[in-house]
Image (spheres, helix red, strand yellow):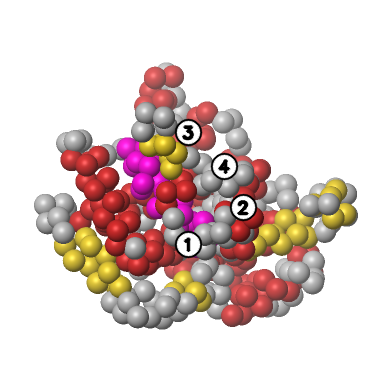
Amino acid sequence: MVGPTILDQDFGCLVTKDNTLLKAYLEALEPTNRRLIFLGLHFYLPESLLSRLPLRMNKILDRSEKVFRGFCQEYVRRRRLATIPRSPESAQARSSNVLSQMIFNTGLDDRAIVDQMLTFLAAGVSLFRGVHLANRSSCIFWHLLTPFKHDTTAAAMTWACYCLARAPEIQDILRHEVGTALSSRPAPPASATFESLPYLNGVCEEVLRLYPSIPINIREAVRDTTVAGVSTPKGTRVLLCAYALNRAADAWGPKANEFHPERWIDTASDGTRRPNKHGGAPSSMNNLTFSHGPRACIGRQLAKAELRTAIAGLVRKFRIELRYPERQALQAGVVTPKPAGGMHLKLTIVNPRVT
C-alpha cells in the first residue's frame, strides 16, 4: 500500500521474496525479545554509548539502514530526473505520487526527502539512526518500535473483526450502510466516500481507541515545564500510555471499555448523521492512538483510509463470526497488541455479487 501511494511503485512483496529491500525490511522488523531488551537499555544508557557497543541489534540496524538509505537516495535521484519540468503543466502532470509532490512543491533538498521516505517506509516512524528529527529522544524510541509497527494496520483490522464478530447487530448496521452507499455509485468508490459514512467511521475510530496499535509512547521535555501540575525539568522522559488514557472513564464515560461506535456520530436537528472527531470525549486530545502535535503519526490519515477501505470491503461481502466464540481474546505481542494464538474467524459470503 505504501509503495504505490507514496512512491508509485509496487515492491512485489506478495509475489516474491527475492528482493534485497524486502529482506532488509524483514531482518530489521524481526519481533524478538532481544529487540525489546535493546529498547529498554535506551531508558538507562545514552544512544551515543549504545550505538558504539558490539551488539547484534546495532549491526542489524546499521546493515538495514544502509540498504534502505541507498534505495531511497537512488530513487530520489531518478525521480528528480523524471520530474525536471519543461513547463509547469508537464511537471504537475508528473507529480502523481507523494514523493513527486515533495520534490516539486516543497523545495526540500535530497537529504530531507530521503529522511521523509524512510519515515513513510517505516510506517509513520523513524527506523534508522541519522534521520534528522528535532526530538532526538523520540527518534531513539521510535526507531526501536518500528519493527512492531509494520503490521499496525493489520493488527487494527484483526481487532475490528473481533469487535464486529462479537456484535452482530453492529455488523448488520455497518453492512447496510456500506451496501447502500456503494450500490448508488457505479464507479469505484473514492476514499472520501468511505470517510463520509458515519457508522463506518465510528467503527474504525472505536477500534483504534480500544486497541491502539502502539499502546505506549515516550516524549522528552525540551525545556523546564509542568505536566498536569507536576514539575517536569528539561530532559525528563514522560511515558504516555494510550491504552489506559483511551479507556479512561472520566473522559469516555462509564462505558469506556465497551465497543460503542455511536459515540463517534453526531445527529443534527434534521436527523442527519455525521462523523465527529472527538468520540464524545471533552477533547480529541483524550485519544492518543496517533499522538498529537508535531510528533503525531505522519501516516495517520493513510492508516485510517486503509482500515476503512478494508473493513468496508470485508463486511460488505462476508458475515464475520468467531470460530471459537467461547474463547476470550487475550492481548499479547511484544509491543503491538495482537490476539494470543491468533484470531480464528468464520467468514460466510452474504453478497456473492461483490468481488
Q: Residues in magenta?
A: 192-212
Residue carrying label 4: 113
Q: Quadrant of residue 350?
A: bottom left
Circle 1 packing at 10 Å, graded few (<14), some (14-19), many (20+), is few
* SS type, badge 2: helix
Compared with 112, 30 (above or below) is below
> In 3D space, how far apart are the residues under numbered discs 2 and 4 (Cα atoms)?
39 Å
Q: Which mark is residue 258?
A: 1
Q: Which sits earlier in the primary sequence, circle 4 or circle 3?
A: 3
Nearer to us in this view, 355 or 203: 203
Residue type at mark 2: give it. Answer: Ala
Q: Are marks 2 and 4 in contact (CB under 8 Å)?
A: no
Secondary element type, mark 1: loop
Q: Specify whether 264 is left or right of 18.
A: right
Judged left or right of residue 11, residue 352 is left
Q: Which mark is residue 101?
A: 3
Mark 4: which amino acid?
Ile
Residue 110 point in image, percent of width and height: 58, 40
Q: Which residue is mark 2?
A: 251
Instruction: Name the residue: 34% across, 63% down.
Output: 167
How far from the left and from the top, in percent, is residue 180?
Answer: 22, 42
Which one is nearer the viewer's eye here, 278 or 271? 271
